[in-house]
Image (cartoon, helix red, strand yellow):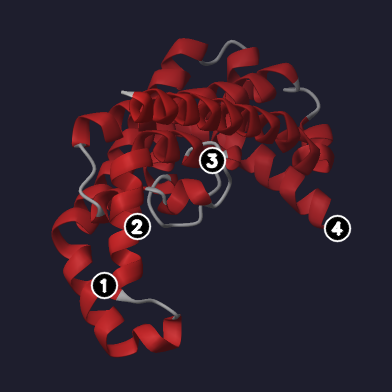
Amino acid sequence: MPGNILFDVFNFLVLIIKDMGYLGIFLGMMIESTIFPLPSELILIPAGALVATGEMTFPLVFLTAVAGTIIGAMINFLFAMFLGRGLVNMLVKKYGRFLFLTEARLRKTDVFFNKHGEITTFIGRLIPVARHIISLPAGFSRMNVFKFIIYTALGAGIWSAFLIYLGYLFWDRLEWINVHLNSIYIPVLILVLIIVIIYILIHKNHHKDNSRK
């Protein structure tokens, strides 16, 4: 039953996106990139199906999706940078013991993002759930905004291209995607693992080289 519901949702969203066009993709991905739990799968897979039928083009769907993601991510980022940290600090002082949060842990988060913000932002865009919130710690730690945009765009680009191609490839078998959606994430998670391993190895070698100087 849940499978049939998701299949119906896919078909319904194909009609919605077809009606709204690229603006619908932009707005959907902008919302998805904020803290609202709107899965990008429900936007870009139907869009990929429309690419397959010739009603949309891959480049425009891709660019619109990435642009929407960046704008949504910047909303979270700027909120966290200018408004959120003061509120978080206040909450930590009052209720931190109940949330297992301390000011020291917040400072550690800042230090971590200062050192590894780029790779964390990039990988966060490839992981379900993390995509919705990764902009907040980046904003809290006041990560360089240009680096934030670049690595957000890189991660969002890979994820968007993957989902669009998925819809393009299985446009006439959306029910198959519906059944195997969890398995489809495996290649992306493997890619994330490879990137993390490469990053750790490069970081360790760089650290060793600096310690020898």
At x 50% / y 50%, what residue is drawn? 130
Q: Which badge, 3 or 1, is on the more N-terminal residue?
A: 3
Q: What SS does tag 2 mark?
A: helix
Q: Which residue is mark 2?
A: 109
Q: Is residue 22 visible?
A: no
Q: Which residue is mark 3?
A: 40
How far apart in space, not on screen, are marks 1 and 4 (Cα)?
41 Å
- Camera-near label (2 vs 1) is 2
Query: Looking at the picture, how far across and down is residue 74, in whole percent?
Result: 26, 43
Neighbourhood count class around disc 4 (C-alpha, 10 Å): few under 14, some 14–19, many 20 upward = few
At x 30% / y 52%, what residue is drawn? 111
| Nearest the eye: 133 or 47 | 133
Neighbourhood count class around disc 1 (C-alpha, 10 Å): few under 14, some 14–19, many 20 upward = some
Q: Which dot marks residue 88?
A: 1
| Nearest the eye: 118 or 199 | 199
At x 13% / y 57%, what residue is drawn? 82
Q: Which badge, 2 or 1, is on the more N-terminal residue?
A: 1
93 sits to left or right of 57: left
- Camera-near label (1 vs 4) is 1
How far apart in space, not on screen, are marks 3 and 1 (Cα)?
28 Å
